[in-house]
Amino acid sequence: MNRRVFLGATAAGLAATAWPAFIRDAFGDGAACEMNGKPSTAPPVAQVSAAFRRAQQAGKALLVLVIPADDSARWERGRAFGELLNFGADRDLAPLAGVEVVCATMADLKKIVPGAGAGEPLMVLVRTDKVPAAATPLDASLPAYKSGRGIDRKSWEQQQKDEEKIAAQRIGALGDLLRKSLGGADDRDVAARAAGVRARLVKQPPAGAHWASSSGCGTTIEGVEENGVIGCGMGHVPEKSRRFLYFFSVEQRG
C-alpha cells in the first residue's frame, strides 16, 4: 500500500533574481517545475511560489484552493471542488479562466503571502500586481450529505435524489462565490472560457493536487503508477463526488 504524506509540489524553473523579495526569502532560488513532463517532489511551498510567479507573469491573480489541515476535512473539500470542476455549468467555471489556480494549505500559502489571513476559507484570492500581495478570503457555506448507510431500497432511491439536490446546491454555492469574486461569467465567450478551464483543470489536476476516484472502498489516483488501495472503508460516496481532488501525495515504490 502506498503511503500518504502531504502533497509534494513543483516549482517554476525561472530566474529567482526576478522574483519579488518575499518569494525569494520563502523559497531561495527555486527548483525545476517539471522533469520529463512529470511534477517534481519539491516542498509544497515551492508549488505556491511557482504558481504565484506564473500568475504574476501572466498578469493574473492567484486563486488558492485551500487544503485543510484535518484529514477528514481534506476528503470533504476535495469532493466539493471535484463536484464543481467536473459538473459545474459554463457560467460556474468561466471565472476560473482569468486566474492561476493552485491547491495549498494556509500554512504554506502564508510562507509566500504572509497576509493571507486566518482560518481555512474555501479559497484565497491573491493579487499579484503589488508587493506585498493583497489576499482576500473567499468562503461560503456548503450543505453536507447525509449518510447513505443502513437504508432500504426505497429509501436508497430517495437518498440518491436528495444527493443530486445537495450536489446542485454545493456546485451552485461555489459557482456563485466565483462569479461574485472573479467575474467573467457573463462574457460572450463564456462557453469558450469554460472549455479552456476544463482542459486546464479537469483533464489534468490543478497544481498541488491529484485527481482521484472512489465509489466507497478504495481510491484510484489518476496518473500514479503502482496505485494502491487507499482509504478503503470510506463508505458510500455520492455519485457526483466520486471523482475528486486528492490532497495527499503518494510515494510510489520502485
Image (tube, rainbow, N blue to C red):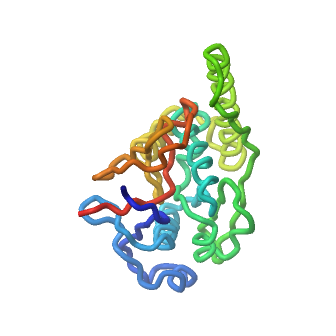
Q: Residue at x 72, y 42 (%)?
A: 142
In the image, 3 versus 181, the foreground residue is: 3
Quarter placement of the N terminus: bottom left
Position in image of residue 246 (x %, y %): 49, 51
In the image, 145 versus 112, the foreground residue is: 145
Position in image of residue 187 (x %, y %): 60, 36
Q: Is 163 situated above or below 32?
A: above
Q: Residue at x 43, y 66 (%)?
A: 8
Res 174 quadrant in image: top right
Q: Is 247 situated above or below 14?
A: above
- Drawn side of residue 45 relative to residue 222, left or right: right
Q: Total label count? A: 0
User: From this viewpoint, is residue 188 visible?
Assistant: no
Res 108 quadrant in image: bottom right
- Drawn side of residue 192 relative to residue 204, left or right: right
Q: Is 188 situated above or below 48?
A: above
Position in image of residue 123 (x %, y %): 65, 55
Position in image of residue 65 (x %, y %): 59, 55
Q: Residue furthest top?
A: 154
Q: Residue at x 44, y 43 (%)?
A: 218
User: From this viewpoint, is residue 54 visible?
Assistant: yes
Q: Is 219 situated above or below 21?
A: above
